[in-house]
């Protein structure tokens, strides 16, 4: 998504954009570097629900304040997680999954790409909403977690919809439910958790662009306008929707409000579950 945004901005503004990948501490290092950059429009941060929604409530000390140190320009896309199960798991539907989980407290395990990941928190939110007890098995990344799920070493996990799709189509995984507010075209026969007896349940992944605080409003508006034009173009929008994403291309005020609401929501889930970073 960073490369895609860089290509579109470079084409619109007629100058190159360089993607500088700065990993570490679940995105905190790169996000902090962006927050501390000059507010001149030449450094932008592409980050998402991890850095902006989860990490503020997960880490005791974090080198930036997501609600004060950034001008959040636009949410680019969002996409739900999908609850998937190994085909050998006895529950064939979400209803059967919940029945099994409630009848076997503490016996059902689930995988995630790591403590504090979006998949982990989606399941913790589900546990809190349903009063169930399941054992978390954190992995160091999504790939090893997915591999063990495919090998039936763990029965279930939440995973991004685009990653799950080829395995679901191949019959190697069974999709039980999606975390979006409404069903999505890629999984038309898979119910939402909200419609399955838990109204209001939603746990989406999302990505957006931000700039250091005090970046001039004219720059913020120009970047947002060019990104919105590109991501709403027929070609690019259809390409992203084919992967299960919802194109947002939101206004700065909308994205700012989204980040604030998400950081507050996930902080409550993290506190209730007493989640600590790896």
Image (cartoon, rainbow, N blue to C red):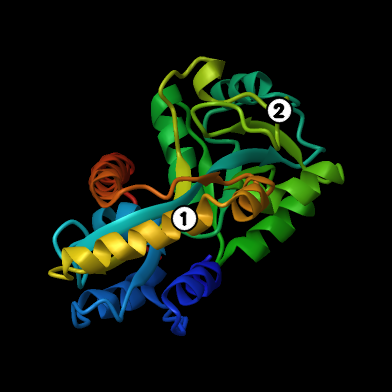
Task: Determine the image quadrant of residue 39.
Answer: bottom left
Q: Which mark is residue 229?
A: 1
Instruction: Please rate how many residues cluster around mark 1, counting C-alpha atoms within 10 Å: few if below 14, some from 14 to 19, many from 20.
Output: some
Q: Which mark is residue 118?
A: none
The residue wearing badge 2 is: 188
Task: Determine the image quadrant of residue 226.
Answer: bottom left
Q: Report whether residue 160 is seen.
A: yes
Q: Secondary structure at mark 2?
A: loop
Of circles 2 and 1, the one toward us is 1
Please tell me which residue is depicted at 46% across the width and 85% down the height of the picture: 16
Question: Answer yes or no: do the residues labelled 2 and 1 have beta carbons within 8 Å?
Answer: no
Q: Position of residue 165 (x, y in %)?
A: 73, 46
Please tell me which residue is depicted at 48% across the width and 32% down the height of the picture: 133
CA distance separating discs 2 and 1: 28 Å
Q: Secondary structure at mark 1?
A: helix
User: Horizontally, is 96 left or right of 121 in the view?
Assistant: right
User: Horizontally, is 275 left or right of 217 in the view?
Assistant: right
Q: Position of residue 81 (x, y in %)?
A: 56, 43
User: 179 or 143: which is nearer to us?
Assistant: 179
Q: Report whether residue 55 is seen.
A: no
Task: Determine the image quadrant of residue 201.
Answer: top left
User: Horizontally, is 106 left or right of 249 in the view?
Assistant: right
Please tell me which residue is depicted at 39% across the width and 64% down the height of the picture: 47
N-terminal of the pair, mark 2 or mark 1, is 2
| Screen quadrant of the C terminus | bottom left
Count of numbered badges drawn on the protein: 2
Instruction: Please rate how many residues cluster around mark 2, counting C-alpha atoms within 10 Å: few if below 14, some from 14 to 19, many from 20.
Output: few
């Amino acid at each position: 998504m960073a490369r895609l945004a860089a290509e579109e901005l470079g084409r619109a503004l007629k100058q190159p954009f360089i993607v500088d990948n700065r990993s570490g501490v679940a995105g905190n290092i790169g996000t902090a570097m962006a927050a501390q950059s000059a507010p001149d429009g030449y450094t932008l941060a592409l980050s998402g629900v991890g850095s902006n929604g989860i990490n503020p409530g997960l880490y005791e000390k974090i080198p930036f304040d997501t609600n004060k140190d950034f001008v959040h320009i636009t949410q680019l896309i969002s996409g739900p997680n999908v609850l998937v199960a190994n085909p050998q798991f006895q529950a064939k539907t979400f209803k059967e999954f919940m029945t099994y989980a409630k009848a076997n407290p503490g016996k059902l395990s689930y995988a995630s790409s790591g403590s504090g990941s979006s998949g982990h928190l989606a399941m913790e939110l589900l546990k809190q909403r349903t009063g169930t007890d399941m054992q978390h098995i954190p992995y160091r990344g999504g790939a090893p977690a997915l591999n063990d799920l495919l090998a039936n070493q763990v029965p279930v996990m939440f995973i991004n919809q685009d990653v799950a799709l080829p395995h679901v189509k191949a019959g190697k995984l069974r999709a039980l439910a999606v975390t979006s507010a409404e069903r999505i075209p890629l999984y038309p026969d898979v119910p939402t958790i909200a419609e399955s007896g838990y109204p209001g349940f939603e746990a989406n992944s999302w990505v957006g662009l931000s700039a250091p605080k005090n970046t001039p409003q004219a720059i913020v508006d120009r970047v947002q306008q060019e990104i919105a034009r590109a991501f709403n173009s027929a070609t690019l929008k259809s390409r992203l929707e084919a992967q299960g994403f919802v194109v947002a291309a939101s206004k700065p005020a909308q994205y700012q409000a989204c980040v604030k609401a998400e950081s507050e929501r996930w902080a409550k889930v993290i506190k209730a579950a007493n989640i600590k970073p790896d």
